[in-house]
Image (cartoon, rainbow, N blue to C red):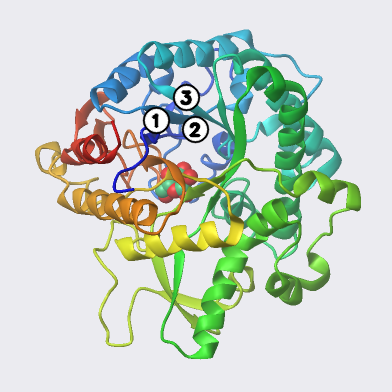
Amino acid sequence: MVKLPSDFVWGYATASYQIEGSASAGGRGPSIWDTFSKIPSKIRDGSNGDIATDSYRLWKEDVALLKSYGVRAYRFSISWSRVIPLGGRNDLVNEEGIAFYRGLIEELLKNGITPFVTLYHWDLPQGLDDRYGGWLNKEEIVKDYVNYARLCFTRYGDLVKNWITHNEPWCISVLGYQKGAFAPGHKGDVEPWIVAHHTILAHAYTVKLYREEFKPTQGGQIGITLDCHWQLPYDDSPANVAAAQRGIDFKLGRFADPIYKGHYPATVKAMIGDRLPEFTAEELAVVKGSSDFFGLNTYTTQIVQEGGGDEINGRITVGFTRPDGSQLGTQAHVSWLQTYPPGFRLLLNYLWKTYERPIYITENGFAARNEDVLPVEQVIHDVDRVEYFEGYANALLQAVTEDGVPVKGYFGWSLLDNYEWADGYLTRFGVTYVDYATQKRTPKDSSRVLKRFFEKHIEA
Ligand code: BGC
């Protein structure tokens, strides 16, 4: 094969808290991000998602933008507290919130755009954190999550055929419960492992529900999105090669191994010991095999050396510098991101070989430097983002056509500049520039790259 298959899907991704705004309009209840973003010094520019890109009101304009970009699909997330303001299984459903997503889904379909819906992109209803500690309470959170998922399958499943449970449980558990950098802002070395375990269970019981009660009539697919940077050993010394594998185990294997293989990685068990919760036999039967595809968010590659670093990452040191002092690639606005397409190709091969599931790239993108301060006339010529997307799209093409990796879809992050979590509005990942004072959207040069690329490389 020299081209991508004719049913290859591509588009852009967003997430509810990052774009919707209207935080207390339309009956929405608060989420842990509404609370966290208002704690002084948590967000670099002191901002929050109260307005964001105002997409709760400008959603039709956003769909028109997607259409003009020539996409086949759009990945967005549902704000749980917009459809169940307090979040719980005995709490009221907000019909206005339900109608909002129904309208969006219908408008997408009318425009020939396939919806890929994420159930959870980090905005837990504050009501559940207040009531029982949110992700820390296994019995309650799994039931409430499954109940919320049931509502979504019931109300949207006639139209939505592609479901993603969580977005990046690594970020939920590590940034939210180990580093304190994301909501709800806890720090420690016990909670992140408990929360991670509970996110896996909530995911797995949701997939069980979908497969038993909805898939037979609705006929869709469901999976999870995990995140990983490719881990490149600093040199070929056995210690650094082992460290790179351990880096993957701690970032990705800790979720992917239970979900696709039915056990935690041995390296994780060895280092975490008793703090790593165990699945009961009954739970394990539900967890193992609980994803129809491999949803991957990936942005960069890290060069890995043995030793140092946090236990949470497997005690490795990561950077971008090779032994000869050279850097991997173009530096982004954020310190954690450099362009390195070969790492993407290696990661795709690793995932296929290790987990043997079809792959969807659910996020991939670049934050070009200084887009927060430069005038729009300059920002729209985003040469670094253009270079990034061209490089990564070509690496994807090689992985599929030369290596035989079954990648089924690709979503660029992101449709719009938006609320970049703890970076607030200072970091911009969009292929569309957003003027936050007026909400005017202006396409950047990068908005044309993927369209050109996929028009050329997808089989007719
Ligand atoms: C997240 C997005 C985020 C992006 C860029 C991913 O980890 O899913 O919400 O904006 O990375 O940092």
Is 238 placed above or below 230 here?
below
Is 378 placed above or below 87 here?
below
**Foreground residue among 212 and 97:** 212
Quick check: marks 1 and 2 in contact, CB under 8 Å?
yes
Mark 1 Cβ and ligand 1 under 8 Å apart: no
Is 210 placed above or below 140 here?
above
Q: Residue at x 72, y 38 (%)?
A: 129
Q: Residue at x 27, y 84 (%)?
A: 325
| Left or right, 7 with reference to 260 | left
Near mark 2 (Cα within 10 A), the count class, few <14, some 14-19 or many ≥20, is many
Identify the secondary structure beneath mark 3.
strand
Quick check: marks 1 and 3 in contact, CB under 8 Å?
no
Query: Distance of mark 2 from mark 3, alpha carbons?
Result: 18 Å
**x, y percent for residue 9:** 39, 34
> Which of the two discs, 2 and 3, labels the residue nearer the N terminus?
2
> Which of the two discs, 1 and 3, labels the residue nearer the N terminus?
1
Identify the secondary structure beneath mark 1.
loop
Q: Residue at x 16, y 43 (%)?
A: 379
Q: Residue at x 63, y 62 (%)?
A: 253
Residue 115 is labelled as: 3
| Left or right, 437 with reference to 215 | left
- Closer to viewer: mark 1 or mark 3: 3
Is 328 placed above or below 182 here?
below
Residue 196 appears in view: no
Q: Amino acid at mark 1?
A: Ala
- Residue picked out by circle 1: 52
Residue 17 is labelled as: 2
| Left or right, 444 with reference to 149 | left
Write down the quadrant of residue 254 in the picture: bottom right
Q: Amino acid at mark 2?
A: Tyr
